[in-house]
Image (cartoon, coloured by chain):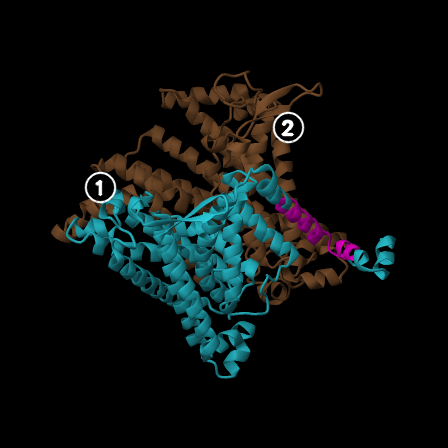
Chain colours: A cyan, B brown
């Protein structure tokens, strides 16, 4: 300790030492991070254990995953900051949107080729297969676009309906009460979906017929297909749209006011219930679309998909700072990439665990999140 | 002083007896309902006994888990939704320690350290407590909802760890001489628990094997064909109920001790507790670790006799089952936790399956449609509800989770304080009841059980009420 204060008087190394004494935890994590980075650089440049192309593919995969997490995370982050509770049913909104959208896509793409019931049930019980219907963004563009739209709209309606029936009567309760209630909503939604659509994981796209491009990257290729591009365009476009909406309209200002202090917002004449409804509309829409494009990108659909994504979304939202949509996007990318490239160092079974560890580390080092203070746009 | 103390303990005993009476009455109703519905529908005696045994088992495990969770949430206000993680660590570490050495028995892919079962149970509980320490140390500085997310993430990390092939099997030194043995956690295919039957060993140690054999003989007179498994599971259920009583006693003692009073003070207002000079972080960590050890033990007791354990048993939904049980009973009350565990196990957890069993064995319905489409299309086209009803019956396992979700929402809307009404354990050390107004409230006991109508208004209102 004494040497620390003594060194503080001197130049730069002293400041580092002071920092290390003040925040030992941060220092430890920084050292671990440097070691990991060092081993990656060593693997890339010296030992050749990791090729640039593999790293590129993993990062690209992580970006895709991160876009989905970020897009769905915007909705979670908004409800978290404005309604003040961690919504554990958010993952099942994703699943609901995905199933609604994919039912539409199946119905349009397979119209006349299979009976409408099986199509609307997204081939429950193995009655129809997405691959056999030749579904893909290039082969059945109308069906995919219609699916995206329906996924968004259905999730908006679902979110509004659930809010009216479940959350509105207990709006003034504590965040924990709402959190527990949302767990109930999650259970009911998820297993209703399983009851109707079955528990099997089905393939949804014609994996073989998706156009692919191979980009040369230093020592190999990184493959990018049309569904990657679709995801990029849809997610990027919606993120930009939300940014503009919240920056240029009064709605964004009202939301910021509400997340700061709800009573004060109401006193100044902000129609808080209407802001809440807008929150659900924007959040729900983005979430539903995220669910749809996530399934389009990964090519399989199961009743558990949204729930499995939920904890990663929480990680992203906390990482970015609750209430900030940029935080949600950035956090999503960090979490997605972390989960994806973690396989360089650790077995693949731990990739989700790695994302959680990143979240816990951020909570320890900077609990307010990376983008704190810049809430809702 | 000694006079007041004597009347305090006297009334305490009376109150406790009343609470015990409530629990016994509830159990009687539950068992009665199961027996009567089984009898009416002509269930066989063997089936009746088996369903009694499994009902007792689930009441036991859910009541123990709800009690342990009550220590976290009801006493200390720690929002832990990683219960399964601690259960998993408990049973896996116990198996690691107590499984026989590799090669000494035939079936298992990996061995353990071959130590006695009690040692394994102790180490399993310690490991769960140690994990609790690791989680609590950083997470206690965070808001309640952050702690929630950290704990659920931790429980998933635990599950992935036991699921991964990395720890499926490895070498481990088992003597000081450096001999190694093949051990591991079995990965996704699970771990065979090939130690000797813990219940029989326990009965042997307490010297009741004669009584046990006698019981097998008695049951054998009623159910001639292979009575031993029935007796085994019934006795195991009774042992679990004994464990519930032990947990109850432990938590009651903890709650009434100076330590417990600090915990309740933390729950009510942490800043005040800290201002009074209490190191609240330390109290929270100790309380968290104790609860985690109890969860570890509950995990051990749940799975020890099942023959095998797989990581995917420990999905987060099991945590939420425990939460529903606690919320049914009312967080903060030990009696409520036990009753909530019993109601959850009987109505929401076993009830639908029992219903399905009874209906299937009585009406012998035909084959259910394999998916929702064939189930609904006759209903739409020909108003034939049969396939849909069959499909519904067949999907009871999914629908029961829907029912649980709806029940949770309903509870949070209409009865967030639980079935016993508002009866948080009070934080005060002295009886808060009106002096001379009948029996005062013993420290840490509950308002509803008080003979005087509603002391919540004058005493509890100030301390524990909203």
Pair 2/1: label in front = 1
| Residue that numbered label 1 is attached to | B369
Q: Chain of mark 1?
A: B
Q: Which quarter shows the C terminus of chain B?
A: bottom right
Secondary structure of the residue carrying tag 2 is helix
Label drawn at residue B119: 2
Residue drawn where x is 47% and y is 68% of the image: A171
Q: Position of residue A220 (x, y in %)?
A: 46, 43
Q: Which quarter shows the N terminus of chain B?
A: bottom right
Q: Is residue A209 left or right of residue B272?
A: left
Q: Chain of mark 2?
A: B
In this view, the residue farthest toward the bottom is A268
Q: Position of residue A253 (x, y in %)?
A: 50, 77
Q: Is residue B270 left or right of residue B32?
A: right
Residue drawn where x is 30% and y is 44% of the image: A208
Other residues around mark 2 within 10 Å, as few (<14) / some (14–19) / many (≥20): few
Q: Is residue A223 above or below residue A75?
A: above
Give the CA distance from mark 2 to mark 1: 50 Å
Sequence-wise first label, 2 or 1: 2
Q: Is residue B288 visible?
A: no
Q: Is residue B69 visible?
A: yes
């Amino acid at each position: 300790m004494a040497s620390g204060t003594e060194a503080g008087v001197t130049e730069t190394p002293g400041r580092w030492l002071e920092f290390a004494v003040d925040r030992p935890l941060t220092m430890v994590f920084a050292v671990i991070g440097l070691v990991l980075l060092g081993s990656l650089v060593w693997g890339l440049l010296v030992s050749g254990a990791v090729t640039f192309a593999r790293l590129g593919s993993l990062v690209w995969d992580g970006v895709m995953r991160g876009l989905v997490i970020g897009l769905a995370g915007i909705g979670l982050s908004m409800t978290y900051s404005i309604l003040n509770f961690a919504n554990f049913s958010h993952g099942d909104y994703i699943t609901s949107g995905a199933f609604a959208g994919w039912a539409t896509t199946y119905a349009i793409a397979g119209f006349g080729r299979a009976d409408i019931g099986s199509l609307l049930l997204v081939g429950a019980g193995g009655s129809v297969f997405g691959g056999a219907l030749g579904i893909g963004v290039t082969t059945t563009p109308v069906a995919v676009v219609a699916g995206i739209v329906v996924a968004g709209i259905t999730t908006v309606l679902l979110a509004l309906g659930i809010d009216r029936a479940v959350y509105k009567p207990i709006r003034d309760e504590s965040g924990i009460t709402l959190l527990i209630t949302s767990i109930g909503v999650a259970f009911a939604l998820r297993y209703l979906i399983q009851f109707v659509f079955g528990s099997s994981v089905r393939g949804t796209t014609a994996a073989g017929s998706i156009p692919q491009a191979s980009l040369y990257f230093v020592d190999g290729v990184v493959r990018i297909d049309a569904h990657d591009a679709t995801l990029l365009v849809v997610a990027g476009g919606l993120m930009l749209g939300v940014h503009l909406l919240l920056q240029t309209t009064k709605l964004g200002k009202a939301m910021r006011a509400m997340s700061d202090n709800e009573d004060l917002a109401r006193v100044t004449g902000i129609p808080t219930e209407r802001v809440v409804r807008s929150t659900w509309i924007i959040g729900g829409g983005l979430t539903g679309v995220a669910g749809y494009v996530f399934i389009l990108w990964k090519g399989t659909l199961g009743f558990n998909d949204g729930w499995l994504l939920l904890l990663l979304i929480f990680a992203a939202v906390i990482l970015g700072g609750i209430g900030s949509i940029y935080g949600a996007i950035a956090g999503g990318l960090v979490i997605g990439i972390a989960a994806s490239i973690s396989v360089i160092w650790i077995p693949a079974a731990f990739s989700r665990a790695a994302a959680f560890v990143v979240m816990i580390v951020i909570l320890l080092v900077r609990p307010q999140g990376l983008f704190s203070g810049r809430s809702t746009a | 002083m000694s006079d007041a103390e004597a009347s305090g303990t006297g009334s305490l005993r009376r109150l406790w007896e009343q609470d015990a009476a409530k629990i016994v009455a509830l159990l009687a109703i539950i068992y009665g309902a199961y027996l009567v519905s089984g009898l009416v529908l002509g269930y066989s005696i063997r089936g009746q006994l088996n369903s009694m045994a499994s009902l007792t088992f689930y009441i036991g495990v859910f009541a123990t888990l709800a009690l342990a969770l009550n220590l976290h949430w009801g006493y200390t206000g720690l929002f832990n939704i990683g219960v399964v993680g601690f259960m998993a660590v408990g049973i896996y570490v116990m198996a690691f320690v107590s499984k026989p050495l590799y090669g000494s028995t035939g079936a298992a892919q990996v061995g353990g350290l071959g130590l006695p079962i009690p040692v394994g149970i102790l180490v399993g509980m310690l490991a769960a407590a140690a994990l609790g320490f690791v989680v609590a140390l950083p997470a206690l500085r965070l808001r309640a909802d952050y702690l929630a997310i950290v704990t659920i993430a931790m429980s998933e990390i635990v599950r992935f760890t036991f699921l991964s092939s990395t720890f499926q099997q490895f070498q481990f030194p088992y003597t000081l001489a450096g001999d190694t043995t093949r051990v591991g956690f079995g990965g996704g295919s699970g771990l065979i628990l090939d130690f000797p039957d813990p219940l029989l060993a326990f009965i042997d140690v307490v010297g009741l094997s004669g009584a046990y054999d006698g019981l097998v003989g008695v049951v054998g007179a009623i159910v001639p064909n292979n009575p031993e498994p029935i007796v085994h599971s019934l006795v195991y259920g009774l042992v679990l109920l004994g464990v519930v009583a032990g947990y109850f006693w432990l938590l009651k003692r903890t709650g009434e001790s100076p330590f417990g009073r600090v915990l309740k003070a933390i729950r009510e207002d942490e800043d005040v507790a800290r201002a009074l000079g209490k190191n609240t972080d330390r109290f929270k960590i100790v309380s968290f670790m104790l609860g985690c050890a109890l969860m570890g033990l509950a995990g051990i007791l749940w799975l020890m006799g099942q023959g095998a354990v797989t990581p995917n048993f420990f999905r987060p939904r099991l945590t939420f089952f425990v939460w529903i049980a606690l919320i049914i009973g009312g967080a903060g009350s030990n009696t409520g936790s036990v009753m909530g565990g019993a109601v959850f196990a009987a109505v929401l957890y076993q009830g639908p399956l029992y219903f399905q069993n009874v209906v299937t064995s009585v009406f012998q319905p035909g084959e259910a449609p394999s998916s929702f489409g064939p189930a609904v299309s006759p209903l739409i086209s020909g108003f034939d509800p049969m396939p849909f009803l069959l499909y519904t019956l067949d999907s009871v396992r999914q629908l029961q989770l829907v029912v649980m979700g709806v029940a949770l929402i309903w509870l949070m809307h209409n009865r967030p304080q639980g079935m016993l009404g508002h009866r948080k354990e009070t934080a005060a050390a002295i009886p808060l009841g009106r002096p001379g107004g009948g029996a005062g409230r013993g420290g840490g006991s509950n308002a509803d059980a008080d003979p005087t109508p509603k002391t919540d208004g004058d005493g509890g209102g100030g301390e524990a009420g909203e």
